Amino acid sequence: MSAFCEGALFSVLPMGGIIFDIKRFSVHDGPGIRTTVFFKGCPLRCQWCHNPESQRVRRELMVWRERCIGCGACVSLCEQGVAVPDRVRGEGCILCGQCVDGCYAEARQMVGREMSVQEVMAEVERDIAFYDESGGGVTFSGGEPLLQPTFLYALLQACQAKEIHTAVDTCGWADWAVLDCVRPHVDLFLYDLKLIDEVAHRRWTGRSNDRILDNLRRLSAFGQRIILRVAIVPTINDDAQSVRQIGSFAAKLPGLERVDLLPYHRAGAEKYTRLARDFSLPGIRPPTKEKMAEIARVFTALGLQVKVGG
């Protein structure tokens, strides 16, 4: 047993973490009807990320400027004297949330809340009957759940004790010791793969993919159930070389269950404005159905089981 696992065993009861959303009745994050628990924080900075609010571990303030009615309630409630109507935050904001609680128009939202294992499990256990009927369960996603490893470990153990099917949606950028510890408690890995070329991966995500690829090889060698998920982003990884590289790598993984090809979408573009950040790919459009079918044929020809969409 690794040092991490030994430490985690003593941290199960008091351990908590930061979550930014819990979605019930999800059907796109693994088999059956699922509850998806979104962890806050991610080591990558994918420029096409559709959940930018997931990237930072700390709480963040989002503002819908179009909802703001200019009533000034946020200003009057801010004890720091830094709240500004229709803006994310002024200098000196401590993210106390008072302006959010007092916003009549619901134009302000605090993203991220600390939760204990018991609190998360209380949400999860509400739908056990649906998991049992549909072959579903719980998916831990993000962000990156492996960035809060002890919290994830404790939740996986709690689910296992209740015989709830577990899936972990991961980018794979973590120490192998963490993955090696949690993998016996994971029924299915949804493993996101962006690019094979290391230079391109670093350019578009901010990190090397060395450990991502190595961890994927190791998980596969251990016989873990893995569905590979590849977001197809035009001009970034939809060219023939990138597609062939990803497909060839996937074809060498023993026992890979399936490859899900996920067409890029722009649903998260407005979130960047709400967080007062710049969206770096404003000109990118979703791939066509024809393009997705063409890429699927390449993967199929390599002997892979392929599904377009999650």
Image (cartoon, helix red, strand yellow):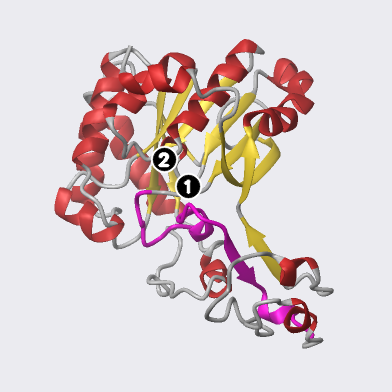
Q: Quadrant of residue 279?
A: bottom left
Residue 14 pos. (x, y %): 59, 28
Residue drawn at (34%, 12%), measured in percent from left and top?
223
Q: Is residue 306 above or below residue 38?
A: above
Q: Find residue 143 and name its label.
A: 1
Asked whether 126 falls inside the magenta stretch, the response is: no
Residue 54 pos. (x, y %): 51, 53
Q: Amino acid at mark 1?
A: Gly
Q: Main secondary structure of the magenta part?
A: loop
Q: Which residues are magenta?
A: 43-69
> How far apart are labels 1 and 2 at the CA level?
8 Å
Residue 94 pos. (x, y %): 58, 68
Q: Nearer the viewer, residue 300 or 153?
A: 153
Pair 1/2: label in front: 2
Asked whether 62 falls inside the magenta stretch, the response is: yes
Q: Cβ–Cβ below 8 Å for labels 1 and 2?
A: yes
Residue 257 in view, yes or no: no
Q: Quadrant of residue 100?
A: bottom right
Q: Quadrant of residue 62?
A: bottom right
Residue drawn at (74%, 81%), measured in percent from left and top?
68
Q: Which residue is mark 2?
A: 147
Q: Quadrant of the N terminus?
A: top left
Residue 125 shown left or right of residue 260 in the figure? right
Residue 179 in view, yes or no: yes
Instruction: Please count the marks in the image.
Output: 2
Residue drawn at (35%, 49%), measured in percent from left and top?
43
**Residue sitting farthest toward the right:** 104
Q: Is residue 273 above or below residue 262?
A: below
Residue 16 shown left or right of residue 234 in the figure? right
Q: Nearer the viewer, residue 142 or 298?
A: 142
Q: Is residue 206 above or below residue 32?
A: below
